[in-house]
Image: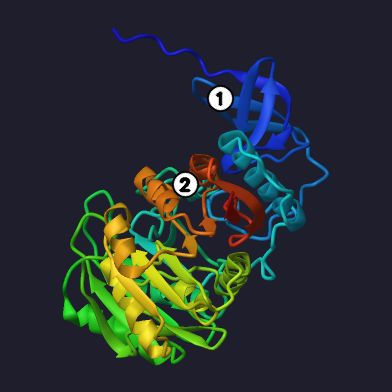
Amino acid sequence: MGRKRKPLRVFENVEILNIGSEGKSVAKVDSLVLFVAGTVPGDIVDAKEVKKKKSFIEAYPMKFHKYSEDRVEPFCEHFGLCGGCKWQMLPYEKQLDYKQQQVMDQLTRIGKVELPEPMRILGSAETTNYRNKMDYTFSDSRWLTMEELQESEGKELDRKACGFHLPGHWNRIIDIDHCHLMEGSSNKIRNQLLDYARENNLSSYSYKDHTGFLRGLIMRTSITGDLMVIVQVGYKDMGPINGVMEFLKENFPEITSLNYVINTKQNDTFGDLEVVNYHGEPFITEEMEGLKFRVGPKSFYQTNSKQAYELYKVTREFAQLTGEEKVYDLYTGTGTIAQFVSKEAKEVIGIEYVESAIEDAKENASYNGIENCKFYAGDMKDILTPTFVKEHGEADVIITDPPRAGMHPDVVKQILKVAPKRVVYVSCNPATQARDIALMDEDYKVTKIRPVDMFPHTQHVENVVLLERR
């Protein structure tokens, strides 16, 4: 017989004290640290244990005895089920306060380096309809609420859905009626395509059996007004595919790039698959300070276009370019930062491990008539070597914008060998940024800090740090 599991504990009248790392609400009971989902500082709740870790307990609120005075009414009907905008119950200014606190906590606790007073976090002018990319999933067995189950009384319900994955459940999809993250006709396109599927008996994808026709819907918009739609289907059948494409083309003339992907794999990624352009251009065009960037179905571009412009302005300001500097842009992606700062630099060298991104960068630089940017593809730790630096020249300024995992230790070591005057570190994860800064502390001093909020109503925050050679 297996060991008997201990019953999950209930902690009564727990006051939520703060918001900690990764946006988790924090409470303390005796010597125990509790992370209580769905709460904000000032709430008093009965919290039930979900999972016990070595140094903390995860819990959820069973009963609210008192609501925090800081709480506001969530604006989305799907709040509580959808995991996309978990901070809707906090006023936006409070969200910014907690994000700034999160950045400084990480830099202080993990970095343990001397820090200047940070600049105030740069909030987003738009707190809804700010995303330029949305990814929806079709399903043949949408998630049913307890109310729906009770009201159905055993009747067969329509289970088709097009929406988001239920947090923590890869095979459960919440049907979305209205999402507040993208402006324009995105909600109408999603809902009417699902209606078309019902009317024409098109099957939706089953994550249990890996069968079904309609699989995914991706929409991308741009500041220039372009709209890209990509429909992902589970198998090749040109009759239904053409039917879906014609339906979208005829009913939504605002679509400037209409595409489909046939995906027979057991995962939704399509980076290795052909995207077929059915109508319009195979790209949309973003614009920033007169620069134009062609964004294809597989291209990376910051998902908050207007706030990306603010982030890049902070980055350029911290770089303090005069027109005489050689700049290395590490993890350059499609070269947006490299091209954005190029007019104030002598030369920019962009390095990125994704070859298709580098091809996009080269194409966009050519499209913009930029001649002082060069781009190279390969693993950062393998490319950024003494031989590479000797061949291309030593950097006066390094801009680095790594993924959430931060920089490889070998990359940090090479930056220290190159010894630029300044390093501008852009990060989507202040924890790994703090770790890397600590490795550079002997040679570099943090002189400026500015968080930037790219994703209102979420716990995510970008942070820009300027390090200057001691």
Q: Is residue 85 above or below residue 111?
A: below
Q: In screen coordinates, is 201 left or right of 101?
A: left
10 Å crowding of disc 2: few (<14), some (14-19), many (20+): few
Closest to the observer, 441 or 144 = 441
Closest to the observer, 319 or 313 = 319
Closest to the observer, 162 or 349 = 349
The residue drawn where x is 74% and y is 54% is 73
Q: In screen coordinates, is 404 left or right of 454?
A: left
**Residue 276 location in percent, x, y?**
24, 80
| SS of the residue under disc 1 | strand
The residue drawn where x is 49% and y is 59% is 420
- Number of marks in picture: 2
Question: Which three-letter amino acid code belongs to the residue tagged 1?
Answer: Ile
Q: Earlier in the sequence, mark 1 or mark 2?
A: 1
**Residue 270 location in percent, x, y?**
26, 65
Q: Residue furthest right?
A: 69
10 Å crowding of disc 1: few (<14), some (14-19), many (20+): some
| Colour theme | rainbow
**Residue 152 location in percent, x, y?**
47, 50
Q: In screen coordinates, is 228 left or right of 387?
A: right
The residue drawn where x is 62% and y is 59% is 77
**Residue 20 location in percent, x, y?**
64, 37
Quarter of the image with the N terminus in it: top left
* Foreground disc of the pair 1, 2: 1
Task: Find residue 57 and name its label.
Answer: 1
Q: What residue is pinned by disc 2?
A: 167
Q: Does the rendering let one see residue 373?
A: yes
Task: Find residue 404 and name its label.
Answer: none
Q: In which quarter of the view is residue 248 placed?
A: bottom left
